[in-house]
Image (cartoon, rainbow, N blue to C red):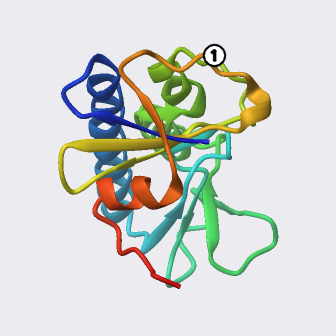
Amino acid sequence: MKYITLKTSETGKKFMACYEKMIEASIQAKELAISLGAKEWRPLPSMIAIGGISSLIFDNVPDRKIWKNVYGTSNEWMPKLNTKEGRLIHSLIESLPNVPRREIGRCIGFDSCPYKGVGFEIGEGAYIGFSVMEEWNVQVPDDCEEVTTTRYNVLLGKEVSND
């Protein structure tokens, strides 16, 4: 089921706050990864919508006194917790902000389990779109409107196919 709400509505403001927090979480994760010499990072597991770092990916093997290889990969690493330097890096990683799926669900009053995530999109114009599964029986706030997929795409500024 697809819904839209204005960015200026109460629900829209909640989604926008989550979105801004998601952007900040992504920026901070990227900055930390780069400062540690990594070229990429793997985000936290699926219960987190965005943010955090579960492992770092390096072009070259990092200092094995500080880093341990993850899942037998050749380039994915996490800090060792038995060294002072590793614990410091771990504490930096742990301090990163993240946005749990549950926090996004709460924008519409849905206190979901971790595996039932409300998907949302920020439109180019005045609208935010979000979707939920019908079987979840979500009571959507009054400032939201259920719409067809076509109208959803139009209001969010997506390209609409005439096929």
Vertical position of residue 151 compared to residue 112: above or below: below
Residue 69: image x %, image y %? 71, 66
Question: Going by the image, does 48 lie left or right of 16?
Answer: right
In the image, residue 113 lies at what x, y percent? 74, 24
Count the labels in the image: 1
Question: With respect to residue 90, does 61 lie above or below?
Answer: below
Percent from the top left, x then y, of residue 119?
Answer: 54, 44
Judge by depth and name the residue closer to the eye, 39 or 107.
107
- In this image, 155 relative to 113: left or right? left
- Packing grade of label 1 (10 A; few <14, some 14-19, many >=20) is some
Q: Residue type at mark 1: give it.
A: Asp
Residue holding disc 1 = 111
Q: Which residue is drawn at 40% across and 60% down?
A: 153
Seen as rendered, the residue at the extreme front is: 162
What residue is rendered at 40% in x and 33% in y?
Answer: 97
Residue 57 found in image quarter: bottom right
In the image, is 140 to the left or to the right of 80?
left
